[in-house]
Image (spheres, rainbow, N blue to C red):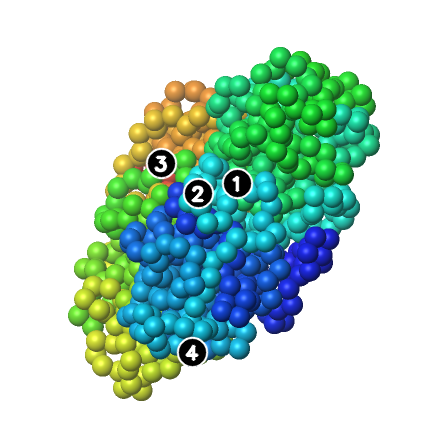
Amino acid sequence: MIFTTIIALLNAGLAISAPIYHPSRDVTLDPAAVAQAQVRDDTASRAFSAAQIQTSSGQCLAVDPASGDFRENLIPIQAVACNGSDTQQWDIITSGVHNNEPGFALVVSTLTNGCLNFDPRRAAGNQVLLFSCGGRADGSGAVTNSQLFTFTGGAGPLPLVPQNGNNATCLTVNGDLLDQTTCDPTTASGDELFTISASGSQSVSESTSASTLTAAETSSSSVIPSATTASVEAIATASSTASASVATGTTVLDPAAVAQAQVRDDTATRAFSAAEIQTSDGQCLSVDANSGDFRENLIPITVQACDGSAGQQWDVITAGVHNNVNGTALVVSTLTQGCLNFDPRRAAGDQVILFSCGGRADGSGNVTSSQLFTFTGASSSIPLLPTNQASTCLFNNNGNLDVTTCDTASPDSTELFTISASETTSSSASASATLVAPSASATPSSAEAIASTSSTILSTASASSTISAPASTGTTVLDPVAVAQAQVRDDTATRAFSAAEIQTSDGQCLSVDANSGDFRENLIPITTQTCDGSAGQQWDVITAGVHNNVPGTALFVSTLIEGCLNFDPRRAAGNQVILFSCGGRADGSGNVTNSQLFTFTGASSSIPLLPTNQANTCLFNNNGNLDVTTCDTASPDSTELFTISASETTSSSASASATLVAPSASATPSSAEAIASTLSTILSTASASSTISAPASTGTTVLDPAAVAQAQVRDDTATRAFSAAEIQTSDGQCLSVDANSGDFRENLIPITTQTCDGSAGQQWDVITAGVHNNVPGTALFVSTLIEGCLNFDPRRATGNQVILFSCGGRADGSGSVTNSQLFTFTGNSTTIPLLPTNQADTCLFDNNGNLDVTSCDTANPEADEIFTIVS
């Protein structure tokens, strides 16, 4: 964020004078995107670490993280007066994830972890920039010759010769910017020569020294948060005598991100719970939840007068999800659930922070040595000794928790801390200074707030169908939560076509494979395959909506993934046409981008695909891959024409006609259902045919009792027309549910038809009024066993649209009323059709053992669309 960068520059003046750079661009950094794009390679061999690179005139190469784009890419490199700041520190990497070529090195900013990059395709004067190592904007690249520079060792003076410059290009200083020039590297001179030297202000506590080959001591699992988010938040460094920062507590937290990142481990073994940790002079370690970033990460630990407040309470965890190392402990804030974390790669004075346990900013980490401290349990008066760096103790540095070199066998009194029960802790809190086992009745963790985003991953894939699933060649392991955030269906959009095929001139179909991109279902290539009607070959054409506000254009959106067709001319040739999150931001936060808008008038279904972000450009089938070529857009070649048509094998119940499709005015599903629907496509690519067999309920889901108790709540205030009644099909079968056949909350349960046996799974309440029904003439059909409601969601895959879901339509039970659960009911008869109120001309029916939907005459339903309530 731009304001944290400003604060960081001001505070840095405590120790050094901040460099004066060109005015920063008005860029708002996206912390999640930065963390993904700029990742420190802890496996790398470094010839130099945190070193200065000086020009022939004695100036230093420097970067400003806020002068590029939202990912900290495209940052210009400046030549400024040397001042020892972290903006002037560089690592020289001779081998690693992004360098597999002997005799070459990567030149990497220690601050941002971006690589020096020479791109001759860019405009003159703007070809030398800092870019994500590997050459992909989102950090997914491997090795690129635009970032490899000739290096045989030594500090120089030496030229910076990029491998892709064909040994005829040298970097040089042009004014106050790093640029390129034609040269003979063997005779380079003057501004073409650079010298690598140790940074004059490098802290003695740094774990890496310039001019010596070093290996990172920190666990690789801590790579993403500590290295990359540090540059995003840019918390100011403090000198060795810096005063404690006054917690302004002004950070605006993102509740969903906090719930995901800071999760209490209810399985953990706690040596202490809600205890104070006091310094040798009786002060208490304290945290302020609003003094870090939007996720409650990067929080400084201060030393304050003890007051018994929640910010001064700590759990000491000796075993659990994030600690599997005997003789160690995690020191966890009881308030935020973040872990005490020592990261020697951060700026001196800012290396001890609170961070998501496991070391990943989003809470997905497991165990990292940066959070494990030596602990035997023999005493409550102990030094805090991080396991990721020898001879290191934490201490009170004038009000800030900091690190110092120490004799760990005989620590100084200032390096000792006492763990004690908080005197003002409520008597009901388990805050004793003895071993505390996790309470079986512990309240649900904050993770439940966002668990709805991944619940559908636990559901089994839909049954086989007459529509083939795409042959997945991809091997990417998807992150369900990240996918749900990045790929969101726009239910407000105007669709000219829905679930239609897009065919090439030779009758092939544009196809996508959800597992062929990155963990968010971004960066997916579009291939051309034999048309088979699979979900990966279905597309929506959106002419207006959240991500399209430009008349005469359309988005081409994968119906399977919800990602948009995207043309990015900055990417490598042959890899410029991809599927990407609509709006152009990797995390789904984008609005409208012209890289995804294509000219579209609606006058014809046979069209060229003309991106609006580059003139005279057409998409075409390049030997099986969708690619771009220069073209005459007014008179495109036949190979540049595509035909939009309804998929011939699409189920008749799907809205896949090749005509204008308006969004349903009655479709008002809750946001939780939208997320669940998005995730369901990950595993449910195959839709069911009209002869689908009922899935054999394996009933293997491991339920979370706390989550179930929250999601499935009986409405004792409700008016029930029937209680614990059977609902029988026309042939005398009973509607049945199996509590273990859905997700961990007892949501997403299929409704099957079974021989009536009087079991609890075949009993239903019919509710005509209550918390979740305020519409006269309707009823909820509620499982007496589970308390979940019969739910029809037309956005889900065909054959999997009728399920049991938490009443009110929110996965966590927080919903009120949703028309996806209200069915027409007058009470005049016990023999009725089941007519959902959220879609006209629709009846439920027994589809060979599964409760399903079909188009019907609601005034005169067929026999198999009639059900009898038997009390």
The earlier-in-sequence mark between 1 and 4 is 4
- Can you tell which mark lies on residue 460? 3
**Amino acid type of the residue that numbered disc 2 sits on in the rendered structure:** Thr
Q: Pointers 4 and 2 in contact (CB under 8 A)?
A: no
Circle 2 or circle 3, nearest the eye: 2
Drawn side of residue 14 relative to residue 500, left or right:
right
Q: Pointers 2 and 3 in contact (CB under 8 A)?
A: no
**Amino acid type of the residue that numbered disc 3 sits on in the rendered structure:** Thr
Q: How far apart are marks 1 and 2 (CA)?
A: 9 Å
Q: Pointers 1 and 2 in contact (CB under 8 A)?
A: yes
Q: How far apart are marks 1 and 4 (CA)?
A: 39 Å
Query: Which residue occupies 32% across, 74% down?
Result: 184
- Can you tell which mark lies on residue 302? none
- Can you tell which mark lies on residue 123? 4
**Which SS class for mark 4?**
loop
Query: Which residue occupies 76% across, 38% down?
Result: 399
Q: How far apart are marks 4 and 2 (CA)?
A: 37 Å
Drawn side of residue 380 relative to residue 491, left or right:
right
| Number of marks | 4
The earlier-in-sequence mark between 1 and 2 is 1
**Amino acid type of the residue that numbered disc 1 sits on in the rendered structure:** Ser
Q: Where is residue 609 in the image (x, y as percent from the top left)?
A: 33, 74
**Which SS class for mark 2?**
loop
**Looking at the rendering, which quadrant does residue 732 occupy?**
top left
Q: Which of 779 and 190 is in front in this view?
A: 190
